[in-house]
Image (spheres, rainbow, N blue to C red):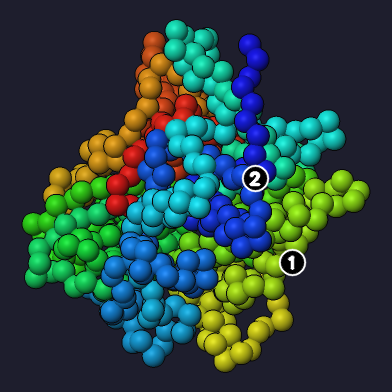
Protein backbone atom coordinates (compact mmCIF):
# COMPACT_ATOMS: atom_id res chain seq x y z
CA UNK A 1 0.00 0.00 0.00
CA UNK A 2 1.17 3.50 -0.79
CA UNK A 3 1.12 6.02 2.03
CA UNK A 4 -0.78 9.28 1.76
CA UNK A 5 1.48 12.33 1.93
CA UNK A 6 0.82 15.75 3.45
CA UNK A 7 3.23 18.65 2.91
CA UNK A 8 3.83 21.70 5.09
CA UNK A 9 6.48 24.32 5.59
CA UNK A 10 6.77 23.48 9.29
CA UNK A 11 5.72 20.38 11.23
CA UNK A 12 5.56 20.43 15.03
CA UNK A 13 5.21 17.14 16.91
CA UNK A 14 3.41 17.71 20.19
CA UNK A 15 0.70 20.19 21.22
CA UNK A 16 2.18 21.12 24.57
CA UNK A 17 3.38 24.56 25.71
CA UNK A 18 6.53 24.46 23.57
CA UNK A 19 4.92 23.16 20.39
CA UNK A 20 1.92 25.48 20.47
CA UNK A 21 4.06 28.50 21.32
CA UNK A 22 6.29 27.71 18.35
CA UNK A 23 3.28 27.38 16.04
CA UNK A 24 1.77 30.67 17.23
CA UNK A 25 5.07 32.53 16.92
CA UNK A 26 5.70 31.32 13.37
CA UNK A 27 2.25 32.45 12.29
CA UNK A 28 2.58 35.80 14.07
CA UNK A 29 5.93 36.54 12.40
CA UNK A 30 4.71 35.36 8.99
CA UNK A 31 1.64 37.60 9.19
CA UNK A 32 3.74 40.58 10.24
CA UNK A 33 5.91 40.05 7.16
CA UNK A 34 3.01 39.34 4.81
CA UNK A 35 4.03 35.73 4.21
CA UNK A 36 2.03 32.53 4.10
CA UNK A 37 3.78 29.76 6.05
CA UNK A 38 1.89 26.49 6.49
CA UNK A 39 2.19 24.98 9.97
CA UNK A 40 0.95 21.59 11.16
CA UNK A 41 0.86 20.46 14.80
CA UNK A 42 0.50 16.74 15.44
CA UNK A 43 -0.78 15.53 18.82
CA UNK A 44 -0.99 11.88 19.89
CA UNK A 45 -3.66 12.48 22.54
CA UNK A 46 -7.35 12.37 21.66
CA UNK A 47 -7.52 16.15 22.04
CA UNK A 48 -5.19 19.03 22.83
CA UNK A 49 -4.39 19.02 26.55
CA UNK A 50 -5.51 15.43 27.19
CA UNK A 51 -1.97 14.23 27.99
CA UNK A 52 -0.87 17.40 29.76
CA UNK A 53 -0.24 17.07 33.49
CA UNK A 54 1.63 19.56 35.61
CA UNK A 55 1.40 21.12 39.09
CA UNK A 56 1.15 23.89 37.97
CA UNK A 57 2.33 27.29 39.10
CA UNK A 58 3.24 29.10 35.91
CA UNK A 59 5.55 32.07 35.46
CA UNK A 60 3.78 34.20 32.80
CA UNK A 61 6.99 35.75 31.42
CA UNK A 62 6.84 33.81 28.12
CA UNK A 63 3.10 34.26 27.74
CA UNK A 64 3.52 38.02 28.23
CA UNK A 65 5.89 38.02 25.27
CA UNK A 66 3.89 35.68 23.06
CA UNK A 67 0.38 37.06 23.61
CA UNK A 68 0.64 40.33 25.56
CA UNK A 69 -3.16 40.72 25.74
CA UNK A 70 -3.73 37.20 27.10
CA UNK A 71 -5.95 38.45 29.90
CA UNK A 72 -8.31 40.20 27.47
CA UNK A 73 -8.37 37.04 25.34
CA UNK A 74 -9.52 34.93 28.29
CA UNK A 75 -6.43 32.86 29.05
CA UNK A 76 -7.19 30.46 31.93
CA UNK A 77 -4.79 32.11 34.39
CA UNK A 78 -7.28 33.10 37.06
CA UNK A 79 -5.68 32.42 40.44
CA UNK A 80 -2.68 34.60 41.25
CA UNK A 81 -0.35 33.34 43.98
CA UNK A 82 -1.22 35.10 47.25
CA UNK A 83 0.85 33.20 49.80
CA UNK A 84 3.97 31.05 49.48
CA UNK A 85 5.02 28.50 52.12
CA UNK A 86 7.88 26.02 52.31
CA UNK A 87 7.61 23.25 54.90
CA UNK A 88 9.84 20.58 56.39
CA UNK A 89 7.80 17.50 57.32
CA UNK A 90 8.42 15.05 60.12
CA UNK A 91 6.25 11.99 60.54
CA UNK A 92 3.62 13.87 62.54
CA UNK A 93 4.88 17.46 62.70
CA UNK A 94 5.88 20.18 60.29
CA UNK A 95 8.04 23.29 60.40
CA UNK A 96 7.71 26.34 58.15
CA UNK A 97 10.89 27.86 56.73
CA UNK A 98 10.80 31.66 57.15
CA UNK A 99 10.37 33.61 53.90
CA UNK A 100 13.58 35.53 54.43
CA UNK A 101 15.61 32.32 54.29
CA UNK A 102 14.33 31.32 50.84
CA UNK A 103 16.38 32.39 47.80
CA UNK A 104 14.43 34.99 45.79
CA UNK A 105 14.12 32.76 42.71
CA UNK A 106 12.10 30.21 44.74
CA UNK A 107 9.38 32.71 45.55
CA UNK A 108 6.19 32.77 43.50
CA UNK A 109 5.02 36.38 43.62
CA UNK A 110 3.54 37.27 40.22
CA UNK A 111 2.89 33.66 39.22
CA UNK A 112 -0.43 31.90 38.64
CA UNK A 113 -1.89 28.57 39.74
CA UNK A 114 -3.31 26.91 36.63
CA UNK A 115 -4.35 23.74 34.92
CA UNK A 116 -1.62 23.46 32.29
CA UNK A 117 -3.95 21.25 30.24
CA UNK A 118 -6.48 24.09 30.12
CA UNK A 119 -3.71 26.55 29.19
CA UNK A 120 -2.71 24.29 26.29
CA UNK A 121 -6.31 24.00 25.12
CA UNK A 122 -6.49 27.79 25.07
CA UNK A 123 -3.14 28.07 23.26
CA UNK A 124 -4.48 25.58 20.72
CA UNK A 125 -7.45 27.85 20.07
CA UNK A 126 -5.14 30.83 19.58
CA UNK A 127 -3.00 28.80 17.16
CA UNK A 128 -5.97 27.67 15.10
CA UNK A 129 -7.28 31.24 14.93
CA UNK A 130 -3.97 32.15 13.27
CA UNK A 131 -4.32 29.35 10.71
CA UNK A 132 -2.32 26.56 12.32
CA UNK A 133 -3.63 23.09 11.47
CA UNK A 134 -3.79 20.87 14.56
CA UNK A 135 -4.42 17.15 14.21
CA UNK A 136 -5.12 15.36 17.49
CA UNK A 137 -5.33 11.59 17.78
CA UNK A 138 -2.36 10.90 15.49
CA UNK A 139 0.86 9.48 16.93
CA UNK A 140 4.17 10.19 15.22
CA UNK A 141 5.71 6.71 15.02
CA UNK A 142 9.05 7.37 13.33
CA UNK A 143 11.12 10.05 11.65
CA UNK A 144 11.30 10.45 7.89
CA UNK A 145 14.69 11.10 6.26
CA UNK A 146 15.85 12.05 2.78
CA UNK A 147 18.69 10.41 0.86
CA UNK A 148 21.27 12.57 2.66
CA UNK A 149 19.98 11.51 6.08
CA UNK A 150 18.33 14.85 6.90
CA UNK A 151 14.91 14.92 8.55
CA UNK A 152 12.04 15.72 6.20
CA UNK A 153 9.09 14.89 8.45
CA UNK A 154 7.50 11.94 10.24
CA UNK A 155 5.39 8.87 9.62
CA UNK A 156 2.27 8.46 11.73
CA UNK A 157 1.43 5.14 13.31
CA UNK A 158 -0.78 2.62 11.59
CA UNK A 159 -4.32 2.27 12.91
CA UNK A 160 -6.27 -0.96 13.13
CA UNK A 161 -3.56 -3.57 13.67
CA UNK A 162 -4.35 -6.44 16.06
CA UNK A 163 -2.26 -7.56 19.02
CA UNK A 164 -0.08 -9.67 16.71
CA UNK A 165 0.50 -6.72 14.39
CA UNK A 166 -1.75 -8.02 11.62
CA UNK A 167 -4.17 -5.67 9.80
CA UNK A 168 -7.82 -5.85 10.88
CA UNK A 169 -10.90 -4.74 8.96
CA UNK A 170 -10.35 -1.24 10.38
CA UNK A 171 -6.72 -1.03 9.21
CA UNK A 172 -5.42 2.34 8.01
CA UNK A 173 -1.83 2.81 6.93
CA UNK A 174 0.07 5.63 8.61
CA UNK A 175 0.69 8.71 6.51
CA UNK A 176 3.79 10.70 5.70
CA UNK A 177 3.80 14.30 6.88
CA UNK A 178 6.63 16.14 5.19
CA UNK A 179 8.00 19.56 6.03
CA UNK A 180 10.97 21.78 5.37
CA UNK A 181 11.56 21.87 9.15
CA UNK A 182 10.33 19.61 11.93
CA UNK A 183 10.26 20.72 15.57
CA UNK A 184 10.09 17.94 18.16
CA UNK A 185 7.98 18.96 21.15
CA UNK A 186 6.80 15.54 22.32
CA UNK A 187 7.76 16.03 25.97
CA UNK A 188 9.93 14.05 28.37
CA UNK A 189 11.67 10.88 27.10
CA UNK A 190 9.90 10.93 23.75
CA UNK A 191 10.41 8.07 21.33
CA UNK A 192 11.29 10.36 18.40
CA UNK A 193 13.77 12.26 20.56
CA UNK A 194 15.50 9.02 21.44
CA UNK A 195 15.64 8.06 17.76
CA UNK A 196 17.15 11.42 16.84
CA UNK A 197 19.62 11.38 19.73
CA UNK A 198 20.89 8.02 18.53
CA UNK A 199 21.01 8.82 14.81
CA UNK A 200 22.73 12.20 15.18
CA UNK A 201 24.64 11.47 18.42
CA UNK A 202 22.99 14.48 20.04
CA UNK A 203 24.01 13.49 23.56
CA UNK A 204 27.73 13.10 22.91
CA UNK A 205 28.69 16.18 24.97
CA UNK A 206 25.85 16.05 27.53
CA UNK A 207 25.67 14.61 31.01
CA UNK A 208 23.12 11.83 31.48
CA UNK A 209 19.60 13.20 31.70
CA UNK A 210 18.11 13.02 35.19
CA UNK A 211 14.42 12.50 35.92
CA UNK A 212 11.76 12.69 38.56
CA UNK A 213 8.37 11.00 38.70
CA UNK A 214 5.62 13.48 39.48
CA UNK A 215 2.18 12.56 40.81
CA UNK A 216 -0.86 14.79 40.96
CA UNK A 217 -4.38 14.56 42.27
CA UNK A 218 -7.10 17.20 42.18
CA UNK A 219 -9.34 17.36 45.24
CA UNK A 220 -12.37 19.47 46.04
CA UNK A 221 -12.08 20.48 49.70
CA UNK A 222 -14.32 22.16 52.22
CA UNK A 223 -14.65 25.92 51.86
CA UNK A 224 -13.18 26.56 55.30
CA UNK A 225 -10.02 24.65 54.28
CA UNK A 226 -9.63 26.44 50.96
CA UNK A 227 -7.24 29.38 50.64
CA UNK A 228 -7.24 30.55 47.00
CA UNK A 229 -3.73 31.47 45.90
CA UNK A 230 -1.91 29.48 48.59
CA UNK A 231 1.19 27.64 47.35
CA UNK A 232 2.89 25.10 49.61
CA UNK A 233 5.97 22.98 48.99
CA UNK A 234 7.61 20.52 51.35
CA UNK A 235 10.65 18.30 51.84
CA UNK A 236 11.12 15.45 54.28
CA UNK A 237 8.68 12.77 55.33
CA UNK A 238 7.78 10.23 54.02
CA UNK A 239 11.05 10.00 52.04
CA UNK A 240 14.26 9.22 53.88
CA UNK A 241 17.59 10.90 53.20
CA UNK A 242 18.51 8.32 50.52
CA UNK A 243 15.61 9.27 48.25
CA UNK A 244 15.04 12.80 47.03
CA UNK A 245 11.77 14.53 46.31
CA UNK A 246 9.04 16.63 47.80
CA UNK A 247 5.44 17.74 47.63
CA UNK A 248 3.27 20.55 46.33
CA UNK A 249 -0.18 21.76 47.34
CA UNK A 250 -1.84 24.55 45.35
CA UNK A 251 -5.24 26.13 46.19
CA UNK A 252 -7.16 27.53 43.22
CA UNK A 253 -10.53 27.64 41.47
CA UNK A 254 -13.78 26.65 43.16
CA UNK A 255 -12.51 24.92 46.30
CA UNK A 256 -9.96 22.99 44.25
CA UNK A 257 -6.58 21.81 45.46
CA UNK A 258 -3.79 20.34 43.35
CA UNK A 259 -1.84 17.98 45.58
CA UNK A 260 1.22 16.23 44.28
CA UNK A 261 4.49 14.55 45.01
CA UNK A 262 7.76 14.21 43.09
CA UNK A 263 10.29 11.41 43.62
CA UNK A 264 13.71 11.76 42.02
CA UNK A 265 14.35 8.62 39.98
CA UNK A 266 17.96 8.25 41.06
CA UNK A 267 16.85 6.44 44.22
CA UNK A 268 18.81 3.29 45.04
CA UNK A 269 16.34 1.00 46.82
CA UNK A 270 14.34 -1.16 44.37
CA UNK A 271 11.79 -1.82 47.12
CA UNK A 272 10.77 1.84 47.09
CA UNK A 273 7.39 2.58 45.50
CA UNK A 274 6.96 6.23 44.46
CA UNK A 275 3.19 5.74 44.23
CA UNK A 276 2.96 4.46 47.80
CA UNK A 277 5.18 7.30 49.01
CA UNK A 278 2.70 9.76 47.53
CA UNK A 279 -0.25 7.98 49.10
CA UNK A 280 1.55 7.88 52.44
CA UNK A 281 2.29 11.62 52.22
CA UNK A 282 -1.44 12.35 52.22
CA UNK A 283 -1.81 10.68 55.62
CA UNK A 284 0.37 13.30 57.31
CA UNK A 285 -1.77 15.12 59.92
CA UNK A 286 -1.33 18.49 58.21
CA UNK A 287 -2.44 17.08 54.85
CA UNK A 288 -5.30 15.01 56.28
CA UNK A 289 -6.72 18.13 57.90
CA UNK A 290 -6.85 19.79 54.49
CA UNK A 291 -8.42 16.79 52.72
CA UNK A 292 -10.88 15.81 55.47
CA UNK A 293 -14.29 15.08 53.91
CA UNK A 294 -12.97 16.26 50.55
CA UNK A 295 -13.44 14.46 47.23
CA UNK A 296 -10.68 13.23 44.93
CA UNK A 297 -11.51 14.17 41.32
CA UNK A 298 -8.48 13.29 39.18
CA UNK A 299 -5.22 11.35 39.24
CA UNK A 300 -2.19 11.33 36.98
CA UNK A 301 1.57 10.87 36.83
CA UNK A 302 4.38 11.76 34.45
CA UNK A 303 8.15 11.87 34.29
CA UNK A 304 9.95 15.20 34.67
CA UNK A 305 13.34 16.08 33.17
CA UNK A 306 15.63 17.30 35.95
CA UNK A 307 19.12 17.36 34.45
CA UNK A 308 19.18 21.05 33.60
CA UNK A 309 21.84 22.68 31.42
CA UNK A 310 24.37 19.88 31.87
CA UNK A 311 21.94 17.36 30.38
CA UNK A 312 20.77 19.38 27.39
CA UNK A 313 21.54 17.49 24.18
CA UNK A 314 22.58 19.23 21.02
CA UNK A 315 19.35 20.98 20.11
CA UNK A 316 19.51 20.93 16.33
CA UNK A 317 19.82 18.30 13.63
CA UNK A 318 19.56 18.50 9.84
CA UNK A 319 15.97 19.54 9.19
CA UNK A 320 14.80 20.39 12.69
CA UNK A 321 15.26 20.95 16.40
CA UNK A 322 14.32 19.76 19.88
CA UNK A 323 12.25 22.18 21.95
CA UNK A 324 10.70 22.24 25.43
CA UNK A 325 10.83 19.10 27.53
CA UNK A 326 12.05 17.05 24.57
CA UNK A 327 15.33 18.80 25.33
CA UNK A 328 14.78 19.32 29.08
CA UNK A 329 14.01 22.86 30.26
CA UNK A 330 12.81 22.36 33.86
CA UNK A 331 14.18 24.53 36.64
CA UNK A 332 14.20 21.93 39.45
CA UNK A 333 14.22 24.12 42.60
CA UNK A 334 11.55 26.41 41.12
CA UNK A 335 9.55 23.31 40.03
CA UNK A 336 8.79 25.11 36.79
CA UNK A 337 9.49 24.46 33.14
CA UNK A 338 6.50 25.67 31.13
CA UNK A 339 7.83 29.22 30.77
CA UNK A 340 11.17 27.93 29.50
CA UNK A 341 9.48 25.43 27.18
CA UNK A 342 7.33 28.17 25.67
CA UNK A 343 10.28 30.49 25.14
CA UNK A 344 12.35 27.72 23.54
CA UNK A 345 9.52 27.15 21.07
CA UNK A 346 9.34 30.86 20.31
CA UNK A 347 13.09 31.08 19.69
CA UNK A 348 13.03 27.99 17.48
CA UNK A 349 10.14 29.54 15.55
CA UNK A 350 12.21 32.64 14.81
CA UNK A 351 15.11 30.49 13.61
CA UNK A 352 12.80 28.42 11.39
CA UNK A 353 11.24 31.46 9.75
CA UNK A 354 14.66 32.99 9.10
CA UNK A 355 15.86 29.72 7.57
CA UNK A 356 12.82 29.49 5.30
CA UNK A 357 13.23 33.09 4.18
CA UNK A 358 17.00 32.87 3.71
CA UNK A 359 17.91 29.27 2.89
CA UNK A 360 21.53 28.23 3.21
CA UNK A 361 23.25 28.41 -0.16
CA UNK A 362 24.97 25.06 0.46
CA UNK A 363 21.62 23.40 1.13
CA UNK A 364 22.41 22.86 4.81
CA UNK A 365 19.22 22.78 6.92
CA UNK A 366 20.67 23.36 10.39
CA UNK A 367 18.97 25.94 12.61
CA UNK A 368 22.18 27.39 14.05
CA UNK A 369 20.41 30.54 15.21
CA UNK A 370 18.21 28.62 17.67
CA UNK A 371 20.77 27.28 20.20
CA UNK A 372 22.62 30.59 20.12
CA UNK A 373 19.40 32.53 20.74
CA UNK A 374 18.58 30.20 23.63
CA UNK A 375 21.98 30.84 25.22
CA UNK A 376 21.41 34.60 24.88
CA UNK A 377 17.93 34.43 26.43
CA UNK A 378 16.54 34.54 29.95
CA UNK A 379 15.92 30.77 29.66
CA UNK A 380 19.66 30.15 29.88
CA UNK A 381 19.97 32.54 32.81
CA UNK A 382 17.09 30.79 34.59
CA UNK A 383 18.71 27.35 34.19
CA UNK A 384 22.29 28.51 34.74
CA UNK A 385 21.42 29.99 38.13
CA UNK A 386 20.37 26.56 39.44
CA UNK A 387 22.67 24.33 37.38
CA UNK A 388 24.40 22.82 40.43
CA UNK A 389 21.32 22.20 42.58
CA UNK A 390 20.40 18.80 41.15
CA UNK A 391 24.02 17.53 41.18
CA UNK A 392 24.31 18.58 44.83
CA UNK A 393 21.08 16.74 45.65
CA UNK A 394 22.35 13.60 43.89
CA UNK A 395 25.75 13.84 45.58
CA UNK A 396 24.80 14.82 49.13
CA UNK A 397 21.17 13.74 49.50
CA UNK A 398 18.17 15.91 50.30
CA UNK A 399 19.51 17.84 53.29
CA UNK A 400 23.10 18.39 52.23
CA UNK A 401 21.99 19.09 48.69
CA UNK A 402 19.38 21.59 49.85
CA UNK A 403 21.99 23.40 51.95
CA UNK A 404 24.61 23.63 49.19
CA UNK A 405 22.06 24.40 46.50
CA UNK A 406 20.46 27.08 48.67
CA UNK A 407 23.84 28.71 49.28
CA UNK A 408 24.55 28.84 45.54
CA UNK A 409 21.12 30.28 44.79
CA UNK A 410 21.61 32.99 47.41
CA UNK A 411 25.03 33.84 45.96
CA UNK A 412 23.46 34.09 42.51
CA UNK A 413 20.83 36.46 43.93
CA UNK A 414 23.79 38.60 45.01
CA UNK A 415 25.14 38.44 41.42
CA UNK A 416 27.90 35.98 42.32
CA UNK A 417 28.27 33.12 39.85
CA UNK A 418 30.50 30.34 41.12
CA UNK A 419 33.05 29.22 38.51
CA UNK A 420 32.28 25.51 38.58
CA UNK A 421 29.56 23.43 36.98
CA UNK A 422 28.99 20.02 38.54
CA UNK A 423 28.24 17.18 36.16
CA UNK A 424 25.75 14.37 36.59
CA UNK A 425 27.71 11.18 37.11
CA UNK A 426 25.24 8.44 36.23
CA UNK A 427 21.90 7.74 34.63
CA UNK A 428 19.01 7.05 36.99
CA UNK A 429 18.61 3.39 36.02
CA UNK A 430 22.21 2.65 37.06
CA UNK A 431 21.52 3.89 40.60
CA UNK A 432 19.28 0.94 41.45
CA UNK A 433 21.01 -1.53 43.78
CA UNK A 434 20.39 -5.29 44.16
CA UNK A 435 17.32 -5.98 46.28
CA UNK A 436 19.16 -8.16 48.79
CA UNK A 437 21.44 -5.24 49.70
CA UNK A 438 18.63 -2.79 50.47
CA UNK A 439 16.02 -2.69 53.25
CA UNK A 440 12.53 -3.90 52.45
CA UNK A 441 9.90 -1.15 52.75
CA UNK A 442 6.52 -2.08 54.19
CA UNK A 443 3.72 0.22 53.04
CA UNK A 444 0.35 0.50 54.80
CA UNK A 445 -2.74 -0.65 52.97
CA UNK A 446 -4.74 2.20 51.41
CA UNK A 447 -7.58 3.42 53.58
CA UNK A 448 -9.83 4.43 50.67
CA UNK A 449 -10.29 7.89 52.20
CA UNK A 450 -6.92 9.62 51.88
CA UNK A 451 -4.82 6.87 50.29
CA UNK A 452 -5.81 4.61 47.40
CA UNK A 453 -4.53 1.76 45.24
CA UNK A 454 -3.30 2.10 41.66
CA UNK A 455 -6.34 0.71 39.88
CA UNK A 456 -8.76 2.90 41.81
CA UNK A 457 -6.53 5.85 40.98
CA UNK A 458 -6.23 5.29 37.24
CA UNK A 459 -10.01 5.00 37.03
CA UNK A 460 -9.87 8.80 37.46
CA UNK A 461 -7.44 9.19 34.53
CA UNK A 462 -10.05 8.45 31.84
CA UNK A 463 -7.82 5.98 29.98
CA UNK A 464 -8.83 5.03 26.45
CA UNK A 465 -6.92 2.10 24.97
CA UNK A 466 -7.98 -0.35 22.27
CA UNK A 467 -7.09 -3.73 23.75
CA UNK A 468 -6.55 -5.45 20.40
CA UNK A 469 -3.46 -3.57 19.25
CA UNK A 470 0.28 -4.25 19.41
CA UNK A 471 1.78 -3.75 22.86
CA UNK A 472 3.51 -0.36 22.98
CA UNK A 473 5.70 -1.43 25.92
CA UNK A 474 8.32 -3.46 24.14
CA UNK A 475 10.88 -5.81 25.66
CA UNK A 476 14.24 -6.05 23.93
CA UNK A 477 14.79 -9.45 25.57
CA UNK A 478 11.79 -11.40 26.89
CA UNK A 479 13.94 -13.34 29.36
CA UNK A 480 15.35 -10.31 31.20
CA UNK A 481 12.32 -9.53 33.42
CA UNK A 482 12.61 -12.87 35.24
CA UNK A 483 16.26 -13.78 34.67
CA UNK A 484 17.65 -10.43 35.85
CA UNK A 485 15.01 -7.98 37.08
CA UNK A 486 13.17 -10.42 39.34
CA UNK A 487 16.24 -12.37 40.43
CA UNK A 488 18.43 -9.35 41.18
CA UNK A 489 16.09 -6.40 41.79
CA UNK A 490 12.85 -8.10 42.92
CA UNK A 491 11.02 -6.86 39.81
CA UNK A 492 11.05 -3.10 40.56
CA UNK A 493 8.77 -2.38 37.58
CA UNK A 494 5.91 -3.54 39.80
CA UNK A 495 6.65 -0.63 42.13
CA UNK A 496 7.99 2.26 40.05
CA UNK A 497 5.07 2.09 37.60
CA UNK A 498 2.30 4.41 38.86
CA UNK A 499 -0.47 2.63 36.96
CA UNK A 500 -0.21 -1.12 37.69
CA UNK A 501 1.05 -1.95 34.20
CA UNK A 502 3.61 -4.55 35.30
CA UNK A 503 2.83 -7.65 37.36
CA UNK A 504 4.74 -10.83 38.15
CA UNK A 505 2.23 -13.70 37.89
CA UNK A 506 2.54 -17.46 38.06
CA UNK A 507 2.01 -19.48 34.90
CA UNK A 508 2.58 -23.25 35.00
CA UNK A 509 4.31 -22.81 38.38
CA UNK A 510 6.80 -20.35 36.92
CA UNK A 511 6.89 -16.56 37.30
CA UNK A 512 6.27 -14.43 34.20
CA UNK A 513 5.97 -10.71 33.63
CA UNK A 514 2.45 -9.67 32.68
CA UNK A 515 2.14 -6.31 30.92
CA UNK A 516 -1.23 -4.60 31.34
CA UNK A 517 -0.68 -2.07 28.58
CA UNK A 518 -4.27 -0.86 28.81
CA UNK A 519 -3.41 0.74 32.20
CA UNK A 520 -0.59 2.89 30.82
CA UNK A 521 -0.84 6.63 31.47
CA UNK A 522 2.22 7.42 29.30
CA UNK A 523 4.48 8.59 32.12
CA UNK A 524 7.60 6.94 30.54
CA UNK A 525 8.99 5.86 33.93
CA UNK A 526 9.56 2.27 32.82
CA UNK A 527 11.63 3.46 29.87
CA UNK A 528 13.73 5.53 32.29
CA UNK A 529 14.09 3.47 35.48
CA UNK A 530 14.25 -0.14 34.22
CA UNK A 531 17.66 -1.20 35.56
CA UNK A 532 18.52 -3.18 32.43
CA UNK A 533 17.02 -0.68 29.97
CA UNK A 534 15.08 -3.58 28.51
CA UNK A 535 11.71 -1.79 28.35
CA UNK A 536 11.17 0.58 25.45
CA UNK A 537 8.11 2.84 25.35
CA UNK A 538 6.73 3.59 21.89
CA UNK A 539 3.45 5.33 21.06
CA UNK A 540 0.33 3.18 20.88
CA UNK A 541 -2.44 4.01 18.42
CA UNK A 542 -3.23 7.69 18.24
CA UNK A 543 -5.84 8.76 20.77
CA UNK A 544 -4.78 6.13 23.31
CA UNK A 545 -3.85 6.86 26.89
CA UNK A 546 -5.30 9.17 29.52
CA UNK A 547 -7.73 11.97 28.83
CA UNK A 548 -6.86 14.32 31.64
CA UNK A 549 -9.30 17.09 32.50
CA UNK A 550 -8.19 20.09 34.49
CA UNK A 551 -4.67 18.68 35.02
Figure check: 123 above or below 410: above
Figure check: 451 above or below 108: above
Q: Position of residue 266 (x, y in %)?
A: 52, 54
Residue furthest right as drawn:
362
Distance, label 2 to label 1, CA atoms, is 20 Å
From the viewer's side, name the closer residue of 219 and 45: 45
Figure check: 131 above or below 264: above
- Residue bearing the label numbered 2: 10
Q: In this view of the protein, can residue 119 be seen by the observer?
A: yes
From the viewer's side, name the closer residue of 146 and 474: 146
Q: Position of residue 13 (x, y in %)?
A: 57, 43
- Residue bearing the label numbered 1: 372
* For residue 178, side relative to residue 397 (left or right): right
Within the image, what quadrant is residue 497 found in? top left
Mark 2, residues whose alpha carbon is within 10 Å: few (<14), some, or many (≥20)?
Answer: many
Identify which residue is drawn at 74% across, 39% down.
Answer: 151
Amino acid sequence: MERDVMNYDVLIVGAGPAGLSAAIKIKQLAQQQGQEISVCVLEKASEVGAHIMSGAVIDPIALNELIPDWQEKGAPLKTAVQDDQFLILGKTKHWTIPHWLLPPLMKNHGNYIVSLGDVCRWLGEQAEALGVEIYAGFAAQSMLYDESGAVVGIITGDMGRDAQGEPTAQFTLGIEIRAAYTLIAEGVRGSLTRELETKFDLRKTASPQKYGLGFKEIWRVHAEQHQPGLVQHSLGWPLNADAGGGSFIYHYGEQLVSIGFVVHLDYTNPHLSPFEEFQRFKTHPAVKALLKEGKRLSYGARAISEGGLQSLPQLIFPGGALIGCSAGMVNVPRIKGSHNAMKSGMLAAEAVLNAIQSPNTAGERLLHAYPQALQDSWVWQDLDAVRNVKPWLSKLGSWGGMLMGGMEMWLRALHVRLPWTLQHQQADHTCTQPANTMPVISYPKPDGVYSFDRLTSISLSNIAHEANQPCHLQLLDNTVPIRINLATYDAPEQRYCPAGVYEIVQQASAPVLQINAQNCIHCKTCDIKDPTQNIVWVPPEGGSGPTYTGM
